[in-house]
Image (cartoon, rainbow, N blue to C red):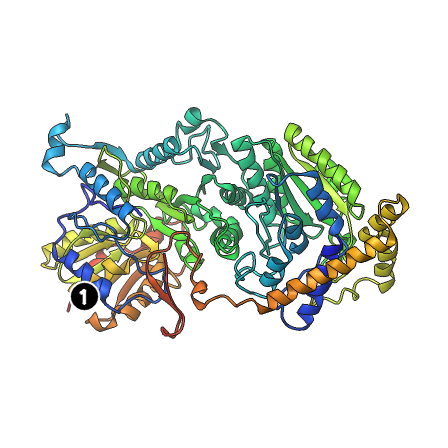
Amino acid sequence: MAAVFQGLGAATAFSVSNSLDSRKFLVSSRKSLSARKASFPVVRSDGSVVPRSNARVRRAEQLITNAVATKPDSSAASTTSKPGHELLLFEALREGLEEEMDRDPHVCVMGEDVGHYGGSYKVTKGLADKYGDLRVLDTPIAENSFTGMGIGAAMTGLRPIIEGMNMGFLLLAFNQISNNCGMLHYTSGGQFKIPVVIRGPGGVGRQLGAEHSQRLESYFQSIPGIQMVACSTPYNAKGLMKAAIRSENPVILFEHVLLYNLKERIPDEEYICSLEEAEMVRPGEHVTILTYSRMRYHVMQAAKTLVNKGYDPEVIDIRSLKPFDLYTIGNSVKKTHRVLIVEECMRTGGIGASLTAAITENFHDYLDAPIVCLSSQDVPTPYAGTLEEWTVVQPAQIVTAVEKLCQ
Amino acid sequence: MATMRRMEIAADSLYKAKLIRGFCHLYDGQEAVAIGMEAAITKKDSIITAYRDHCTFLARGGTLLEVFSELMGRQGGCSKGKGGSMHFYKKESGFYGGHGIVGAQVPLGVGLAFAQKYSKDGTVAFALYGDGAANQGQLFEALNIAALWDLPAILVCENNHYGMGTAEWRAAKSPAYYKRGDYVPGLKVDGMDVLAVKQACKFAKEHALKNGPLILEMDTYRYHGHSMSDPGSTYRTRDEISGVRQERDPVERVRKLLLSHDLATEKELKDMEKEIRKEVDVAIAQAKESPMPEPYELFTNVYVKGLGVEAFGPDRKEVRALLP
């Protein structure tokens, strides 16, 4: 599908042993249980390619030579002291969106206040002026029907991006997302594909109240036929947005309300992140910490404390919520033998619960300790600031959990 | 129409013989709507309907073999046996299905119209729904959206007067479904008269391309119950059913017209019906012989481009598939 790249700010060097492991893992019989969980990376960041089809390999090689700005030859060409440009996460999303809309006239956006208003989080600002009202469509407040409308349009060949102003509102469109979006490709025997992208901010914000702080990834994860990804940095936000738009499958892109103003330097060149790959944030030896979206930052904060205390955590941002990248996760488990999952979903039935089950089923023999999953409490998110802090996992709790796990 | 009638009756007996399982919603009595609509439009226009879709599929160019194969869950079915009675689709002829959830197809239909407006190809989308679905909120949401942007969507209410077991006057405060558009004009059409339906659909297409959405209410009737598990007689009298069959039956009406205008003789019509009966029987026999889907088909078509992995069922032995 698309090549994966290390973000400039995001990762340190990949060890070469990973690519050797990849070949071993391909041959091993320890495959995951169902199609939706395992994935094959196409390109390892150190340049070695696992060929799946000639066309893809060629394209991947082309993209490699252009993208990674840390290579010495490309940095000489740029005029600024550091290559790439700095922007905020919502601007990165907008850039990805704009590039895809330029590239393919079938791509259109629909949602509440995405046009003239510019989007409630400014992700679509300026796009309506550039592309017109029909391509950046302001819908009335009718999630069920405009999601259905997007899916109907996708059946004919358009590629709509449906924005939910807040992920919680998409619960109203659950029927359309589950029955029509996820299942139409299957029930029509492959006749129709639904290349939609459903995106929107979710997660616990700053005292937004119970109904506006929902984590819908747990509700959507069982729907067959869809892919779910969660972005966490401007780099992967733009990459995942572009990959999601180009994907032929319906993709739900989960953004987080509190991450929109993150600033990062991203490459000038065009790049795409793989929809099924996890991101290695910090390689380590003692414990694998799996996380996604905003909790990544809580984990990195805890990691600082942990490093000072002498621990060496390996932090992986799983990014792909459905299917799980059990390949990267598995390699990590085989290395460290201890797993901590830090997520923002509810304790019951959340992404962490599924991930715990998946890892236990597949990598049970490699675990030295039971998997610990830190998640939000099974309560509606309260308004009061102190209570809200208590429902979400905090860095101090992560540190305590790691210490206990590594005893 | 006669083919459709035969097909539905044959499906009835197949269901009772347990070759068709699950839900089977039969369309006999309402054939005029499907045929009349098809006569007025091209294959580039889109039709989307709910679960009572066997005849609409046939009208859009599906074959009897595809219908029976799909109903019996065979490989040769239009959805490879994975859709079933409620999920018939034919992309090449603009038939978008085949939807189980009541009313959910109307926003999809408006989406089809949106895509048609976006690509400016001068075609329209017909979104069919029943009198039961007419009370769904998403319908009014979709209507608002279609009217707001002048989308070429035509919402057709196939009013067979019963939403499963509930008569229309017990479910709707205002059973005049064509008037419910408020700002969208509506037409009431005799849905048992195929020529009236054709005229109405022709007019609707011209109107939608110029002025935006339109509501058509087709006054029709179904002889069978809501589905095969519904006898159809607990909420209406047998006299009512036979009354409609005698006075308003669409196939009879066309037959009378043909005979009275000397366009065909009695014998020709009888021969035609015999032909049709044979066709249907041949299709059923062929479908009965056709193979069931392979076990690996369980995992195909979940994603468009799969994840290149091997998938297997719970026992990890029997059902194995290598996905694209």
As drawn, B241 above or below A138: below
Pick the quarter of the image with the C terminus of chain B.
bottom left
Q: Residues within 10 Å of mark 1 (few under 14, many from 20)?
A: some
Residue A341 located left or right of residue A161: left
Q: Can residue B27 be seen in this snapshot?
A: yes
Left or right relative to A112: residue A387: left
Q: Position of residue B207 (x, y in %)?
A: 69, 31
Q: Please give the residue where the numbered disc 1 appears in the rendered image.
A: A334
**Position in image of residue B141 (x %, y %):** 60, 41
x and y percent of residue B271 in the render?
Answer: 80, 57
Relative to the observer, which residue lies in front, B178 or B198?
B198
Question: Could you tell whether A194 is left or right of A371 in the image?
Answer: right
Label 1 sits on what residue type?
Lys
Give SS at disc 1.
helix
**Residue pictured at 76% horizontal, 48% vertical:** B32
Work out whether residue A223 or residue A344 is closer to the camera in this orientation and state it.
Answer: A223
Q: Is residue B74 left or right of residue B229?
A: left
**Residue B172 seen in the current view:** no
- Chain identifier of the residue bearing label 1 in the image: A
Instruction: Give x and y (percent) for residue A203.
Output: 37, 49
